[in-house]
Image (spheres, rainbow, N blue to C red):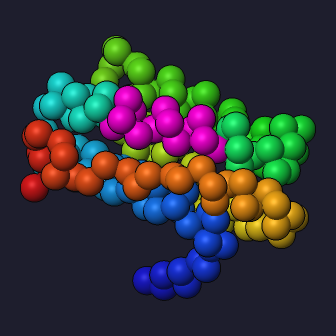
């Protein structure tokens, strides 16, 4: 199996890419939990924690600052915003949790891959130095580490 080369990201966007990495770790943990037959309730608790602690702030950062570089009428930004709406629905779904987790795992992975491989590449192509400097000044925190969550069901 051939793995794509790591993407060299502009330093101003690297903290957001690191957050994407933690998002992919989240999906891996859900995938692992599903394969291990972990109860939907345990995985839902983790999903809810991750949504409140990380995803809401991450989406807000992208929507308020990063996507503005391309403009809200850009088709790539429109796609990302539509995916944010769908992902928020999956994160907040309270019925049919197991299927919601399966969909969330697949759709969040695909969304992160889209942003990293397509959307951010386009942003880097057209971003002005001042725009990247503004993002750099936001002091974007790293996402929560796995050991901060009290129930590591994926181990």
Q: Quadrant of residue 73?
A: top right
Which stretch did the figure color magenta? 50-62
Which part of the image, by quadrant, shows the C terminus?
bottom left
Q: Is residue 84 magenta?
A: no
Q: Residue at x 49, y 32 (%)?
A: 56
Q: Nearer the viewer, residue 134 or 125?
A: 134
Residue 80 at x, y = what percent? Answer: 69, 42
Q: Residue at x 60, y 50 (%)?
A: 138
Please identify the dominant SS of the magenta region. helix
Q: Is residue 35 visible?
A: no
Q: Nearer the viewer, residue 56 or 140?
A: 140
Q: Residue at x 80, y 44 (%)?
A: 68
Left or right placement of residue 128 versus residue 140 in this view: right
Residue 17 at x, y = what percent? Answer: 53, 62
- Number of on-image labels: 0
Relative to 65, residue 13 above or below: below
Q: Is residue 103 visible?
A: yes
Q: Is residue 57 magenta?
A: yes
Left or right placement of residue 111 versus residue 2 in this view: right
Left or right placement of residue 29 versus residue 42 in this view: right
Relative to 148, residue 18 above or below: below
Which part of the image, by quadrant, shows the N terminus?
bottom left
């Amino acid at each position: 199996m051939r793995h794509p080369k790591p993407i060299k990201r502009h330093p101003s966007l690297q903290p957001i890419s690191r957050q994407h990495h933690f998002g992919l770790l989240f999906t891996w943990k859900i995938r692992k939990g599903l394969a291990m037959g972990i109860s939907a309730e345990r995985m839902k608790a983790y999903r809810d924690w991750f949504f409140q602690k990380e995803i809401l702030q991450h989406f807000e950062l992208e929507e308020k600052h990063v996507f503005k570089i391309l403009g809200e009428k850009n088709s790539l930004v429109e796609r990302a915003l539509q995916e944010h709406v769908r992902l928020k629905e999956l994160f907040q779904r309270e019925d049919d949790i197991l299927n919601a987790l399966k969909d969330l795992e697949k759709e969040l992975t695909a969304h992160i891959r889209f942003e990293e491989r397509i959307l951010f590449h386009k942003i880097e192509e057209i971003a002005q130095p001042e725009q990247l400097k503004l993002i750099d000044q936001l002091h974007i925190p790293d996402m929560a580490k796995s050991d901060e969550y009290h129930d590591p069901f994926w181990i």
